[in-house]
Image (cartoon, rainbow, N blue to C red):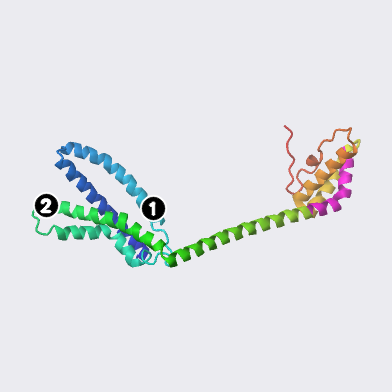
Amino acid sequence: MLGRRDGLRIAHIASTVWFILCVGYILVVALRQAGVRWLVVFSLSGQGALIILILVSLYLFAIFRGISSSQKVQVEHPLTSTIYYAVFYVLAPFLGCLSGLLGMIGINTISQFLLGIAMGTLGTTFLVWVVVDPSIGLLELILPASRKHRAERLAYTKDEREKKQRDRKRLLDEVLAREESDRLYWQEILKPEAEKLAGLLTADITDLKQVEQEAVGIGVSAWQTGGLICMSELRDMAIAISKQKYQNRAVFDYISFWWDGIGNWRAVPIV
């Protein structure tokens, strides 16, 4: 079975289509009464139908996406949020059709009879959708209870938004503080290993394999201690120590290549 919301959407679509048909009929009759030939009318109606089709497609998309029927707070909209008002709003074109039908009782000319129905539909729909509905909505907003609840709702929304911002900032500060604490801890416990690596970087290498094995051992230990971040901190410390102690010597980052393949460590290719 269709839900109440789905039923209103279907009725809204049907009433909108009926309203468009009535407007189209009124335009055709007006053009014919102005002496416009049928060929011109059909030519204009083809272009107009394309525009109407695009507008109706966007309108129906809005209905099915729930944009056209935004959720109203019942306290702020005591009338327009009720199901009875929603039915009245949706069926306005059909109510206009009924009023036009009653008004044309006794008219024998079919064209005038249909024109009366179309005019009744247009007039009632315009009155309800353009005049009555916005006016009632405005009156609802100026009611004391509505204004009070709206102010409370906006204040609550603002507080929630600020609370989320504070929570995000607190989490970020905690993460940064934890990273800084880890960095200081690693600097303390990794200093001896960093000095060893610095010595390997600047030493006169006679046995490259032995030096590489020693560097790999240090890298594996750093990986087991704190993963990739710990390895990166250790490498930076070793290079900084090398530059500080041996200012007159060029320091090349061999560590990145010695450690290539340890855990997630990957050496950056030299271009």
Name the amino acid type tagged 1. Answer: Ala
In the image, taking residue 111 as reference, residue 223 lies left or right, namely right
In the image, taking residue 254 as reference, residue 31 lies left or right, namely left
> Within 10 angstroms of label 1, few (less than 14), some, or many (20 or more) residues?
few
Q: Residue 17: x and y, percent?
A: 27, 53
The answer to which image quadrant residue 206 occupies is top right
Q: Which residues are magenta?
A: 182-201
Q: Residue 240: x and y, percent?
A: 84, 41
Among numbered discs 1 and 2, the one appearing first in the sequence: 1
Is 172 inside the magenta-drawn segment?
no
Front residue of 262 and 73: 73
Confirm whether residue 3 shows in the render: no
Residue linked to disc 2? 110
* Contact check, label 1 and label 2, Cβ < 8 Å: no
Secondary structure beneath dot 1 equals helix
Residue linked to disc 1? 62
x 57%, y 58%: residue? 161
The answer to which image quadrant residue 237 occupies is top right
CA–CA distance in space, label 1 to label 2: 36 Å
Front residue of 64 and 158: 158
Q: Main secondary structure of the magenta part?
A: helix
Secondary structure beneath dot 2 equals helix
The N terminus, quarter of image: bottom left
Front residue of 198 and 11: 11
Name the amino acid type tagged 2. Answer: Ile
Q: Residue 213: x and y, percent?
A: 85, 44
Q: Residue 31: x and y, percent?
A: 18, 41
x 90%, y 36%: residue? 246
The C terminus, quarter of image: top right
